[in-house]
Amino acid sequence: MSQTQVVILGSGTPNADPDRVSASLAVVVAGQPYLVDCGHGAVQRVVEARAMGKIAWDTTDLTRLFVTHLHADHTVGLPDLLYTPWIHERESPLQAIGPRGLADMARHIELAYSENIREHRKAHPSSADGCKIIVREVDGGCVYADDQLTVQALAANHGGLAALSYKFETPAGAIVLSGDTKPVDGFADWARGCDLLVHEVYSARRFALRPPAWQAYHSRAHTSSDELAALATAVQPKRLVLTHQLFWGQTPAQLVAEVQRAYAGEVISASDLDVYAL
C-alpha cells in the first residue's frame, strides 16, 4: 500500500444524493490521516472504508482537520467528528485549522453538546481530551508542518465568504485541494506541477438552464468546466480529480468530457471512497 494517498470520503454538494455524501477527504501519509472538511457522513465513510479494507487507520486517528470554509456541506459533520471518535476512545484533541469564524463555530458546538459531553464523561472511561477541539484561524501561508508534510493555504474566492485552498507537500509529491472557489489570480503559479489537483466544478453546458439568480451565484462563487480546463492547462497537474461536481443533468463522463474539450491531461470524476495513491 502506498505511503501517501488521498481518500475521497464525500464527493457531493449541498444537494442530498443517495450515492454521495458532502465534502470531505483525507490526505494520508504513513498511515496518518489529515482530514479536509467534514460534511455529513464523513465519519461513517471512514468506518465503511475500513470495513472494505481500503484503509488501515480508524476514526480514532482523526486528530487533524483543515477546513476550507464554513458552509454546512463542509462542516455539518463537525459534531460527529468530535464526538463519535471520542466514543471510540480517541484520546487526543482535534486540531482544526481554517478560516475566520471557525473558532466561534467550535465554541457553539461545544455549548450545544455540553450535556452529551457531561453524560458520556460520566458513563464511560474515554479521555477527557478526546472530545476537545483546538482551533487556529488562518488566512494563508504555511499553516501546518510536522515530520511528514507541510501544508500551505491560499485565499480562495467563494462569493465573499472567507475560504481557503490547501496544498499538502509530502515526500511523495504535492496535493492541491481547491475547496469551493471561482478561479483566483495566483492559484496557477501556486499549484503548478502538482501531482494531484482536486478541484470543484460545475457544468458549463448546463449553466444556461439554471435560473438567473443561481447563474449569478455560481458564476461568482464556483468554477465552470471551461474555467477549470483553462486553469488545469496552466497548472499542468499529473492528475486532475473533479469533486463537488454540479452535474445539473450531465453524467460524470459528460462532465469529464466538458473539461477535456480544452484540457489534454488526465481527468477523473471522483466518487465516494475513491482512493488515489501518489
Image (cartoon, rainbow, N blue to C red):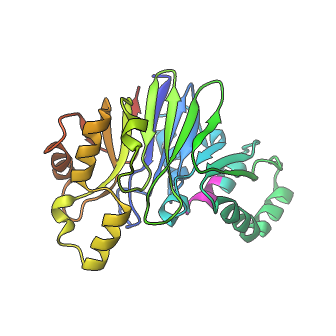
Is residue 275 visible in the rendered image? The answer is no
Of 30 and 172, nearer the camera is 172
- Residue 248 in percent (x, y) is at 23, 65
* 95 is within the stretch colored magenta: no
Q: Which quarter of the rendering shows the C terminus? A: top left
Q: Main secondary structure of the magenta part?
A: helix
Of 136 and 185, nearer the camera is 185
Above or below 236: residue 23: below
- Left or right of 9, for residue 247: left
- Residue 9 in percent (x, y) is at 45, 47
Q: Residue at x 45, y 25 (%)?
A: 173
Q: Which quarter of the rendering shows the N terminus? A: top left
Is residue 151 visible in the rendered image? The answer is yes
Q: Residue at x 40, y 56 (%)?
A: 181
- Left or right of 247, for residue 107: right
- Residue 264 in percent (x, y) is at 17, 35
Q: Where is residue 63, by image quadrant?
A: top right
Above or below 261: residue 249: below
- Residue 115 in percent (x, y) is at 79, 69
Q: Residue at x 83, y 50 (%)?
A: 128
Q: In this picture, which residue range is highlighted in magenta? A: 76-81
